Amino acid sequence: MADELTIEKLIELMPKAFLPDKAQGVDAVIQYNLTGAQAGDWVITIKDGKCTVAKGAADNPKLTLMADGADYLAVVTGKLNPMSAFSAGKIKLKGDLGLAMKLMNFFKLPG
């Protein structure tokens, strides 16, 4: 059986899974506030064709994503439709919603 994908592993994969050609001209700091069994706060920075991740909180993020870790994993792996999750309040977004709509396209993640 393959290793189970965890939030920690997913966040660590983001810089390697980043598709710079899909995020041309994007300069953004994104705050992830995840709750539940796999809780944590991470800052994802996309700038100059690069993606970096760090634990913690950003001072002034362009976008803040709040969700239960299990729900976020379900969205990333294709088990839960992102729009359904947002509509049902499973994923909450604050800030640049246009960026949120494009965010999944910036990464080639498992799913």
Image: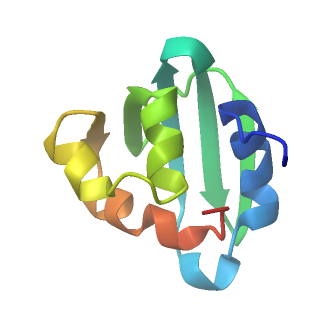
Image point 70% across, 67% down: which residue?
18
Q: Is residue 24 at all visible to an observer of this figure?
A: no
In this picture, is 22 found above or below 34?
below
Between 16 and 26, the one nearer to me in the picture: 16
Residue 19 seen anywhere in this rendered image of the structure: yes
15 vs 36, left or right, is: right
Left or right of residue 89: residue 107: right
Q: Above or below — where is 95 with respect to 42? A: below
Horizontal side, residue 35 vs residue 51: left or right = left
Residue name at image x 51 percent, y 28 percent: 69
In the displayed orientation, state which residue is furthest to the bottom.
Answer: 21
Q: Is residue 100 placed above or below 39 in the rendered structure?
A: below
- Name the one closer to the observer, 79 or 19: 79
Q: Position of residue 62 (x, y in %)?
A: 40, 46
At horizontal 50% and vertical 35% (from top left) the residue drawn is 31
Question: Which residue, as the protein is rendered here, is positioned at the far front?
Answer: 1
Q: Is residue 49 above or below residue 98?
A: below
Q: Residue at x 62, y 58 (%)?
A: 46
**Residue 27 drawn at (x, y percent):** 54, 62
Corner quadrant of residue 101: bottom left
Q: Nearer the viewer, residue 10 or 50?
A: 10
Residue lying farthest left?
A: 87
Q: State the count of labels.
A: 0
- Side (left or right) of 32 relative to 12: left
Q: Position of residue 108 (x, y in %)?
A: 66, 71
Query: Splitting the image into 4 quarters, where does residue 68 fall?
Result: top left
Quadrant of the rendering where the C terminus is positioned:
bottom right
Colouring style: rainbow
Q: Position of residue 16 (x, y in %)?
A: 82, 62
